[in-house]
Image: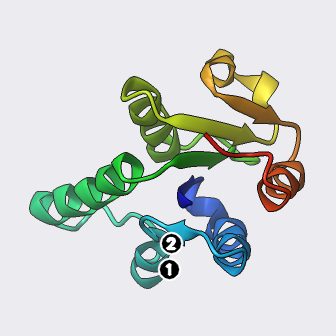
Amino acid sequence: MKIYLAGASEEVDQVRNYMTLVRDLGHEITHDWTELVLKQGGNPREVSEERQQTWCLKDIQGVAGADLLWLLLPESRNSFGAAFEFGFAYAIGAYTAVSGDWKRTIFSSCASRRFDSHALAFDALRSGNLKP
């Protein structure tokens, strides 16, 4: 299955860990945005608008090419990028899952599946119970 993992740049290590686990199950990550975040040290404000657009389009293409968008809801604070990616996935009718404190926002109710923790979502994916 092709999967896009969305999450907060501030929690890049956690998202990257789940990307590794998902790949180990044999799934494809449609776009690994964590590489850029680690290389650039986050989302630097001083980069050109053209470069920002390139990065944004790669994220959008990753979402559009996925069978599943899995949003690891940020634990520390909200993430504009992750929320945008989830909203885009919902708008195009993609299958979505959110994990973490999903009751914190009304928008989680739009997800195809909701999990109280990232570990529970991963267990569902591993057992074949998280698929479109």
Side of 36 relative to 16 (left or right): left
The amino acid beneath tag 2 is Thr
Closer to us: 60 or 44: 60
Where's the C terminus, which quadrant?
A: top right
Residue 8 point in image, percent of width and height = 59, 54
Q: Secondary structure at mark 2?
A: helix
Residue 114 point in image, percent of width and height = 77, 32
The amino acid beneath tag 1 is Leu
Closer mark to the observer between disc 1 and disc 2: 2
Image height of 6 relative to 85, above or below: below
Image height of 37 relative to 102, above or below: below
Please identify the quarter of the rendering in which residue 116 is found: top right
Labelled pair 1, 2 in contact (Cβ < 8 Å): yes
Number of the label disc, if any, that sits on residue 109? none
Closer to us: 104 or 108: 108
Image height of 87 relative to 25, above or below: above
Residue 75 point in image, percent of width and height = 76, 47
* Distance Cα–Cα, label 1 vs label 2: 6 Å
Please identify the quarter of the rendering in which residue 100 is found: top right
Q: Residue at x 27, y 62 (%)?
A: 55
Q: Mark 1 = which residue?
A: 38
Q: Residues within 10 Å of mark 1 (few under 14, many from 20)?
A: some
Q: Mark 2 = which residue?
A: 34
Closer to us: 121 or 74: 121
Q: Residue at x 71, y 68 (%)?
A: 18
Q: Residue at x 47, y 35 (%)?
A: 94
Where's the N terminus, which quadrant?
A: bottom right
Q: Residues within 10 Å of mark 2 (few under 14, many from 20)?
A: many
- Which residue lies most toward the bottom here? 39
Q: Residue at x 89, y 50 (%)?
A: 120
